[in-house]
Image: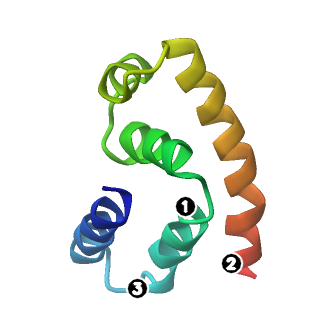
């Protein structure tokens, strides 16, 4: 699920990206997302990239909404240093 979804997002973003945007930006985000566990990655992808609300993500993954919100915040905290590390 996650790798195929991320591949589609990267392709879509590259097609929509302005010509002066470097190609590696989205790939860095994908690499950082792949460092997360499967459920955390699914939560971030469904919420941030697919645009689902936390409640919709909870329903999709059959998890309590509070758990989704908590795991989302924890996943973002883990992603921040990974993305910064990749960017440098």
* Rendering coords of residue 62 (x, y %): 37, 22
Mark 1 surroundings: few (<14), some (14-19) or many (≥20) residues within 10 A: many
C-alpha separation, residue under disc 3 versus residue under disc 2: 17 Å
Q: Secondary structure at mark 1?
A: helix
**How many marks do you count on the picture?**
3
Q: Quadrant of residue 77 in the image?
A: top right
Q: Residue at x 67, y 55 (%)?
A: 79
Question: In which quadrant is the N terminus drawn?
Answer: bottom left
Q: Earlier in the sequence, mark 2 or mark 1?
A: 1
Q: Secondary structure at mark 2?
A: helix
* Rendering coords of residue 64 (x, y %): 49, 14
Q: Secondary structure at mark 3?
A: loop
Q: Residue at x 30, y 43 (%)?
A: 50
Residue topped by disc 2 = 87
Question: In which quadrant is the C terminus drawn?
Answer: bottom right
In this picture, is 5 found above or below 42? below
Q: Residue at x 66, y 45 (%)?
A: 76
* Rendering coords of residue 29 (x, y %): 54, 67
Residue topped by disc 1 = 33
Q: Are marks 1 and 3 in contact (CB under 8 Å)?
A: no
Residue topped by disc 3 = 20
Along the viewing direction, whichever of 80 and 60 lies nearer the viewer: 60
Q: Earlier in the sequence, mark 3 or mark 2?
A: 3
Q: Residue at x 30, y 68 (%)?
A: 13
In this picture, is 59 found above or below 57? above
C-alpha separation, residue under disc 1 versus residue under disc 3: 24 Å
| Horizontal relation, residue 58 to residue 37: left or right | left
| Horizontal relation, residue 37 to residue 73: left or right | left
* Rendering coords of residue 57 (x, y %): 38, 27
Image disc number at residue 2:
none
C-alpha separation, residue under disc 2 versus residue under disc 1: 14 Å
């Amino acid at each position: 699920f996650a790798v195929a979804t991320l591949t589609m997002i990267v392709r879509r973003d590259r097609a929509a990206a302005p010509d002066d945007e470097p190609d590696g930006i989205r790939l860095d985000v994908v690499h950082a997302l792949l460092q997360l566990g499967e459920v955390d990655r699914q939560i971030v992808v469904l919420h941030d990239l697919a645009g689902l609300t936390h409640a919709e993500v909870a329903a999709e993954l059959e998890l309590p909404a509070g758990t989704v919100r908590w795991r989302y915040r924890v996943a973002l905290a883990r992603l921040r240093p990974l993305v910064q590390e990749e960017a440098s």
